[in-house]
Amino acid sequence: MKPDFSGYATRAGLRCSDGKTIMPDAFKPQDGQKVPLVWQHGHTDPENVLGHAILENRPEGVYAYCFLNNSQKADHSRELLEHGDIHMMSIWANQLIQRAGKVLHGVIREVSLVLAGANPGALIDSVTVRHSDGDEVLEDEAFIYTGEDIEITHADTNASSDNADDGRTIQDVYDTMNEEQKQVVNFMIAEALATNEGDTAAQTALDNSDDTVAHGDTKEDETNAELGNTTKEGKQMPETIKHNVFEDQGKDGEEKTSHVLSHSELNAIIEMAATKKVSMKDAFTDYALQHGITDIETLFPDAKSITDVPDWDKRRTEWVATLIGAVRKSPFSRIRTTTADITMEEARAKGYIKGNLKKEEFFTVARRSTTPTTIYKKQALDRDDVIDITDFDVVAWLKGEMRLMLDEEIARAILVGDGRDISDEDKINEQNIRPIVSDNEMYTTTIYVNVDNASSNMEEVVDEVIRQRAELKGTGLPNFYTTEAWIARFMTSRDNDRRRLYRTLDELAAELRVNAVIPVEVLLETPDIVGIMVNPVDYVLGADKGGQVTMFDDFDIDYNKQKYLIETRISGALTKLKSAMVIRATAAANQLVAPAAPAFNPTTGALTITNQTGVVYKHGATVLNAAGSPYTVPDGQTWVVDATPAAGYYFETSEDDQWSFTNPA
């Protein structure tokens, strides 16, 4: 059976781009073996197998007789061969062994039809492992290109070894020359490059192995007395030829640092990316490793910014503008609130019986004042940096960051406080900006829920909010400030049929009777807070003239620093009674207990404490208990009794833990 085509799969004696040389008989043990014939080394896809090749070891290298199968790709390849569109082969080999830069042994795994040889010669790209016997094992795969043309075998042609060397290429002829002859040829070509079409065109002509060398007239130079040899035409030839056009060298024998990708090589890279199913960058990198391009990054464009200024890695602050924009603003920094508690029994209107004494009404009046404090943020930039940063306005960018962080700190102080320890000198005084979450129970009601025990769910939170809604007496509909973690628990609540109870936040807001559910990231620092219900309009921020947010610029001439300061002097507090509600989660093991109110006789002033498990009663620092009952409230005095849950217990709401008893004079 005659082969469809034949040719040298690899040549012996060729110097590879990495300095290695494939020696004769390096693949001798494979003489007569059959290996797959594939397209563009695509051995990861069975459809790329075009047929097989029979290897024949020769002194000049390994000759391959190739047989195409009847597949669609093979038929197409046969047509490309007959038309002359492709005319080169290469091999894929591994288990390569070398000594002193000479490849002595290897195993050819497949022969491939390629669009073009990567280099006029061989190329081996692999990692070496040195053994104690002096040999180096090249463990990684190697693609070896020879630059040899394929010989097409027709029906009336015998594909024997006798005619396999017909039509030798320029490289074949060049390899038969001795060193002196090679120097002469190199000198002649170097002269032609200098005087005619230039290095690129001449090199292209030499790389085209189908063309023959056409010697034209060359420009005669004057005799150089320092040259010791003379050509037949009288041209002097240097003793050492430094430029060899058959090797990839630059001036003075230095290795070239720039590479040009030909159209055929680019097609090979695209084919590699498609075959190996990798990105173009990986294919380029693979090509670079095989072809000696060390700085592959230069082939790719520089990275471009997709934004005009750097992005901030920050907490989500959408809630900040909503909160600060909604609070009331006062032109005075000192906020005073005066309240009178007329909810006590003594404040009620009374019926009159003729002849009896009419009693005076008793109620308490309370006053509190909130004074301002200064909140600031300071930054500095070296003036040299301001001048050198030309891509964007770094000063405007920095000032934007300062205002963003100042606003967030004010909003945090309003809602939950700044979170710093009381001893921290940077702490924002909570007597100047009163946090809603910890404000006096006259303004903020706290309710407690247990949602972490085995029998609880988030519906208990909704139920408790609905039950205690009467304690919230703020303006209009409040907002519900919470975290994404708690929102997730609400939104994943399901009924007995596994249907979600709330499909949207609007549905949850309607169930809680709030205007909106707003996630606040800083609340993650207090995980026991399920949410805060408040209408920001009931909170007042006060600032005198000059105390508003102001930006200051200054230049430090001694240190060449441009300094920036943004600050404000404000006060803040809730001004409407019972205008906020805080929902807190208690520990899963805690038990709910409802404290019983003490019994009081206003006539005698006797105060009796009920003995109740899980409840501790106090008057100031004095613990009150059933054993000491009854206690006597002196005439004309008022006692405030506080109830606190004992360890392992919790109350449903803070409204259940304080009573006031007055004994009239």
Image: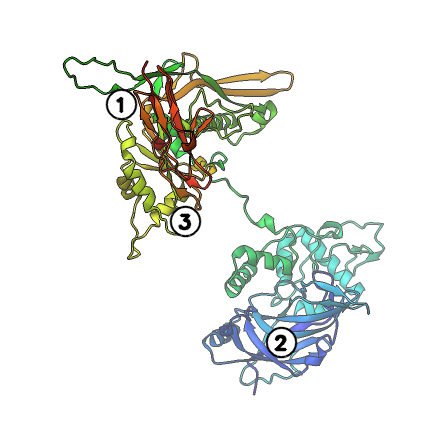
Number of numbered tags placed on the structure image:
3
Q: Is residue 508 above or below residue 308?
A: below
Indicate the amino acid at tag 3: Asn
Identify the residue position indicated by label 1 in the image. 345
N-terminal of the pair, mark 3 or mark 2, is 2
Query: Which residue is disc 3 drawn over?
Result: 453
The kind of residue tagged 1 is Glu
* Label at residue 7: 2
Q: Taking the image as drawn, is residue 349 in sight?
A: yes
Three-letter code for the amino acid on which mark 2 is drawn = Gly
Q: Which residue corresponds to the image point at 26% horizontal and 29% vertical from the top-left?
A: 476
Mark 1: secondary structure: helix
Of label 1 and label 2, which has the lower sequence position? 2
In percent of width and height, residue 397 lies at 49, 28
Q: Is residue 476 left or right of residue 137?
A: left
Between 166 and 454, the residue placed more toward the observer is 454
Q: Observer-nearest residue: 457 or 129?
A: 457
Could you say whether the residue bearing mark 2 is in a helix, strand or loop?
A: strand
Q: Callout 1 environment at 10 Å: few (<14), some (14 to 19), or many (20+)?
A: few
Q: Earlier in the sequence, mark 3 or mark 1?
A: 1
Which of the 4 image quarters holds residue 442?
top left
For the residue carrying disc 3, how many other residues have a C-alpha within 10 Å: few (<14), some (14-19), or many (20+)?
few
